[in-house]
Image (tube, helix red, strand yellow):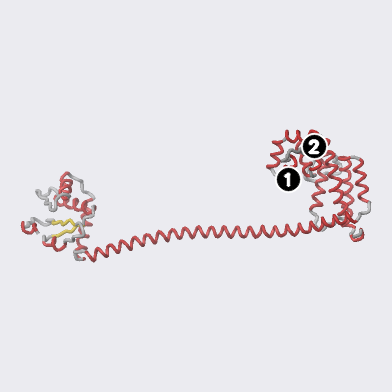
Amino acid sequence: MTAASLSQEEENYVRMSLLLTGISPRGVRSLFDREFAPSCLDATIKKEYNKLNYLKLKRVINQCQWNLLFPRCSGVPDSKTFDVTLMITLLRNLTPMIPPAGGYDCLPSTVEVTQGADLSRIKYYRNYLAHLDDGKIDTTFFNTAWTDITGAIARLGGRTMEQECYQLKTKLLDQTNQEIIMDIKHSKDEIKEIKGSLEELKSSHLKIKKSHELLQENYEEGTKRYSLLQEDYEEMKNSYASLQKKLANSQQDTVPWNVRAQINKNLEKWKNKDKMFVSTRAAKYVLQLLQGNSCVTITASSGVGKTATLQHVALQMNAHGYDILLVTDPGDIVKYYNPNQKTLFVIEDLFGNFSVSQNDIKL
């Protein structure tokens, strides 16, 4: 490869790269060693541990730089291992340096020649170079930037480094320099492709994440629906079991359906009347007798509440699982008797006196 194989814009790029990667770091390090004496660097860094740790938490200092400040082995920190970014960070945060008027992240005006302004210049042009995609620099911009950077290096590192800058601008580029910079250019192209692939991966990741969230929502909605269906199923299952039980009971019922319907109708009337019933000692006594006797007769004078007491007690027995059958003929007791069901037969005299024979009771 010869110098002719590079265009003027590409050659500008090569020289600027050599200036910013070869000479300017030494200029920054010269200032750094004056501010942080190498013999006291370890003690100074340890003294500023809390502030440095804060910068690490804020991601101003990365893990690799942290390892240089606090070596894991028994060694001590050495500025020769520090990159330009780390040295500028320490100078900005650990020394009483005056920042440029526009801040450290902007290109200072040409009239600002403080140490803080010179560090900002070097950082600005390094970032500019790092974001160039085509490896070319316009000659007009190149000359202006070269003068700006050279002035900063001279003020930070002295006359010797200034002379190096002048020589680098005009000297013939050898094959080694060209090959190195062209390799850098190719690497930048590869990095650009990798970044593009990374963006595509990020986009795919976001789509997958959204799909996952949608699936999660659908899953949760499906789970809720399934739970509701399960509840409906259980309810239907219980209803079906209840219907089966009622059907089985109706098939085994010894009482004709029409008689059963009339009895149920009368029981509903009793329940409505019983809402106004006030429990009495007589009612409690009758209930107690029914629990120990197969036959109980309620007798009393007219108007004292025999009927109300009978109905109340019958409903109490019904609540305890007894089938209440209202009969008017003692013979119905034999007819409707069901050995599989606890039954309370009630003979009520609703319309006057009613008498039964002793023989009928014995049945």
- Whether residue 73 is visible to the viewer of this picture, yes or no, is yes
Residues under numbered marks 2 and 1 in contact, where contact means CB atoms less than 8 Å apart:
no
Find residue 358 and report its image quarter. bottom left
- Whether residue 103 is visible to the viewer of this picture, yes or no, is no
- Of pointers 2 and 1, the one earlier in the residue sequence: 1
Q: Nearer the viewer, residue 1 or 29?
A: 1
Residue 64: mark in rendering: 1
Instruction: Tell me how far mark 2 sits from mark 1, CA to CA.
Output: 28 Å
- Residue 76 is situated, as x and y percent measured from the top left of the image, at 76, 37
Which is in the foreground here, disc 2 or disc 1?
1
Describe residue 289's horizontal placement relative to residue 359 as left or right. right
| Residue located 79% across and 41% down the image | 87
- Residue 19 is situated, as x and y percent measured from the top left of the image, at 87, 48
Q: Nearer the viewer, residue 178 or 224?
A: 178
Q: Is residue 145 above or below residue 53?
A: below
Task: Tell me the amino acid under the disc marked 1.
Answer: Cys
Task: Tell me the amino acid under the disc marked 2.
Answer: Ile
Describe residue 143's horizontal placement relative to residue 360 as left or right. right
Q: Nearer the viewer, residue 216 or 179?
A: 179
